[in-house]
Image: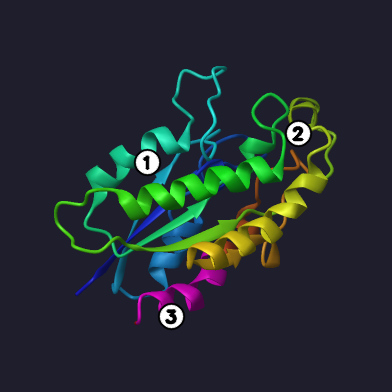
Amino acid sequence: MKKTVLAYGDSLTWGLNPINQTRYTNEIRWPRVLEQQFNGAIEVVEEALCGRTTCFDDKTSIDDRNGAAILPTVLGSCHPLDLVIMMLGTNDLKKFVAGSAMAACLGMKRLVNIVRSYPYMSQTEPPEIIIVSPPHLAETTHPLSGERFSGAIGESKKLSIFYSDLADEMECAFFDAASVAVASPVDGVHLDENNTKAIGKGLQPLVHVVLGL
């Protein structure tokens, strides 16, 4: 039976092109790249929003960017699910949001607890979880992005440490996207085509094991 995977994330999952702010096509976005490697054995549901945080409000946007606020609705809409992959935390590092990797880690823990405690109607056990730490922020001359994430490069490098420890604590699987992808210097946050694809390719072996395929 085909397995269903939820990819829950922000603009890095949505597929934002840093050069022109358009969305990458299916052939480039990492959730679709991941799906394509399984030859029909899995279906990946993309649930991504630019600016999404783990659990913090961002009132500068008309969208509700609070990932913890929206996740229960998403789970209710998308289940039954076999696996939830969550790559969030970059936007938490904005100065006006939370500004620290530790805050993002606490938010990710909240998301894990939501996935585990949601009252699923059509499945008796919660889905498996993979926590993904996003690629590190990079130096950039982009004025807006540079100001939003001023001083956050160091914090972004802490995410993999905190998330790895959290995954051990919560008995989740873990993947460090920075091991396969780097942010574009165009804005220091988003990914070019090859680095976007690399996350989907890099996740494939772990997803294969977690789903028992």
The local secondary structure at tag 2 comes to loop
Q: CA distance from mark 2 to mark 3?
A: 35 Å
Q: Residue at x 39, y 66 (%)?
A: 35
Whether residue 137 is visible to the viewer of this picture, yes or no, is no
Q: Indicate left or right for 44 with 149 as reference.
A: left
Say few, some or many: other residues with alpha carbon within 10 Å of mark 1 (under 14 / 14 to 19 / 20 or more).
Answer: some
Give the position of the C terminus as an image quadrant: bottom left
Q: Name above or below for residue 150 compared with residue 122.
A: above
The amino acid beneath tag 2 is Phe
- Mark 1: which amino acid? Leu
Q: In the displayed structure, would residue 136 be above or below residue 103?
A: below
5 left or right, relative to 204: left
Q: Earlier in the sequence, mark 1 or mark 3?
A: 1
Task: Identify the disc placed on residue 104.
Answer: none
Read off the magenta span.
200-212
User: Nearest the camera: 170 or 179?
Assistant: 170
- What residue occupies the far left of the structure in this picture? 122
Q: Quadrant of the N terminus?
A: bottom left
Does the segment drawn in magenta span residue 96?
A: no
Residue on which the image places disc 3: 209
Q: Which residue is mark 2?
A: 149
Q: Is residue 32 above or below residue 14?
A: below
Colouring convention used in this rendered image of the protein: rainbow
Amino acid beneath label 3: Val
> Who is closer to the viewer here, 66 or 125?
125
Q: Is residue 208 rendered magenta in the image?
A: yes
Q: Secondary structure at mark 1?
A: helix
Q: Marks 2/1: CA distance?
A: 25 Å
Residue under label 1: 71
